Amino acid sequence: MIFWSWATSQTSYEYQPLPSTRHVRLVHIQPGERSAALNCHISVHLLDDPPQYSALSYTWGSPVQERFIDCDDLRLGVTLNLWKALRSLRQATDTRTFWIDAICINQKNIHERNSQVRLMKEIYQRAVEVVVWLGEDKQNSADGVSLIPRIHAAALNGKLLQDPDSLSMRLDQTELPGFDSIVSQPHLVWVSQRSNHITCKRITTSSRLKENLSWYLYL
């Protein structure tokens, strides 16, 4: 088993207990170029009055393919898919603050994990935006992302559930590869489940595409 590590420290990050069941952790992704090592800082806040943050929705992917990042000068393991997302979402000059379940929850502490899961609806609602990571850019994915508002509209009016083939039938033949590249991704299925937590919240879809797409989701 081979692990790729970008962390400079060999000492593992250790979670400290949260002060109460109403406290959450936020992770601050330090700025840097795409090829630079990932550095972050974890802070603890009362959910009733947190600083502005974004919530990241993504699929974990295989836990076996692990990467390491520097967190408060200590080594923290993350999944390959999250590592890719962090590299893409990191900005060159500004720190970005996120709530990310795999980092902000001590996954080894079952009591904390269960307690934090009960807060997830509120965590997503309090976020200034929910960033949906659909994976790295692939062939035709740029075309697929441009179709998301149409898929979203079809889902809201119920037509997508009544006749799943209706949307694809209305697409131009040149749009079908892009459509397939989006709806076939497991990421879309997972984040759709997560998005049920969100009411009237701006969603930002991000991948390695140069353009981000935002729309409002009402559930």
Image: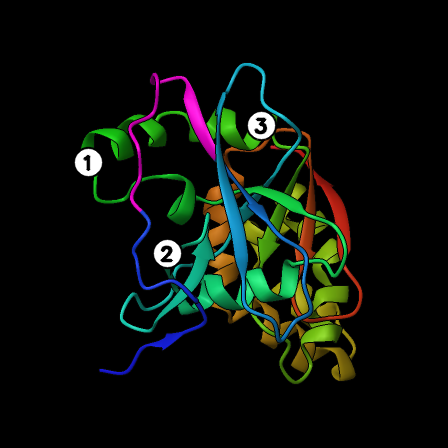
Magenta stretch, main secondary structure class: loop
Locate residue 145 relative to residue 181 in the image: left or right: right
Q: Quadrant of residue 52?
A: top right
Residue linked to disc 2: 76
Please, is residue 10 above or below residue 52 in the view? below
Using the image as rendered, state which of residue 177 and residue 90 is in the foreground: 90
Q: Which mark is residue 201?
A: none
Three-letter code, disc 2: Leu
Seen at 74% across and 61% down, the residue is 92
Seen at 77% across and 65% down, the residue is 146
Looking at marks 3 and 1 on the same chain, the residue that comes earlier in the sequence is marked by 1
Three-letter code, disc 3: Gln
Residue linked to disc 1: 110
In x, y percent, where is residue 208?
67, 71
Please, is residue 67 above or below residue 50 in the view? below
Q: Secondary structure at mark 2?
A: strand
Please give the range of residues in magenta: 14-25
Locate residue 178 relative to residue 45 in the image: left or right: right
Q: Secondary structure at mark 3?
A: helix
Please, is residue 121 above or below residue 2 in the view? above
Quarter of the C terminus within the rendering: top right
Magenta span includes 81: no
**For the residues bearing labels 3 and 2, Cβ distance under 8 angstroms:** no
Q: How far apart, in angstroms, are the residues tagged by discs 3 and 1? A: 24 Å
Locate residue 90 relative to residue 16 in the image: left or right: right
In x, y percent, where is residue 15?
31, 39
- Tell us which disc is closer to us: 3 or 1: 1
Seen at 37% across and 58% down, the residue is 75
Q: Which mark is residue 125?
A: 3
Using the image as rendered, state which of residue 14 and residue 214 is in the foreground: 14
Q: How far apart, in angstroms, are the residues tagged by discs 1 and 2? A: 19 Å
